[in-house]
Image: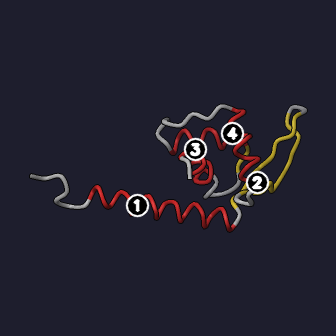
Amino acid sequence: MREPTYFILAALQDGPGHGYAIMSRVAELSDQRISLATGTLYQALDRLTREAMIEVVREEIVNGRARRHYALTPSGRSALRAEAVRMSEAARVVLRPGLGTA
């Protein structure tokens, strides 16, 4: 899983969010390392919706524009957790005590 996808899913782990809220949360969770352009975010949201990792849970009109709120699906939550476990196990290989000491 690519890092932006991981952080988009992570941004939704505590509840639904709309595009701008997701972009802000991704930046916050990644310590500002990931700054998603609007087009990039919505392409990712469309892809994750097609892959059934997230779903639209509410739509509203704000200032004449549709605002969709997205939430993790059970399969998205499982994929996020599996990726977190995979990254943790990979980090353990490098961070284990005694590694790199002479």
| Residue holding disc 4 | 41
- Marks 2 and 1, how far apart at CA: 26 Å
The disc label shown at residue 11, or none:
none
Q: Secondary structure at mark 2?
A: helix
- Closer to the chain start, of discs 4 and 3, is 3
Expressed as whole percent of the image width and height from the top left, the position of residue 52 reads 74, 60
* Horizontal side of residue 86 vs 38, given as left or right: left
- Marks 3 and 1, how far apart at CA: 17 Å
The disc label shown at residue 49, or none:
2
| Residue holding disc 1 | 88
- Closer to the chain start, of discs 1 and 4, is 4
Expressed as whole percent of the image width and height from the top left, the position of residue 22 reads 65, 44
Circle 2 crowding by C-alpha within 10 Å: few under 14, some 14–19, many from 20? some
- Closer to the chain start, of discs 2 and 1, is 2
Q: CB under 8 Å between callouts 3 and 1?
A: no
* Horizontal side of residue 47 vs 9, given as left or right: right
Identify which amino acid the numbered label 2 is placed on: Thr
Residue at left offset 31%, top offset 60%: 93
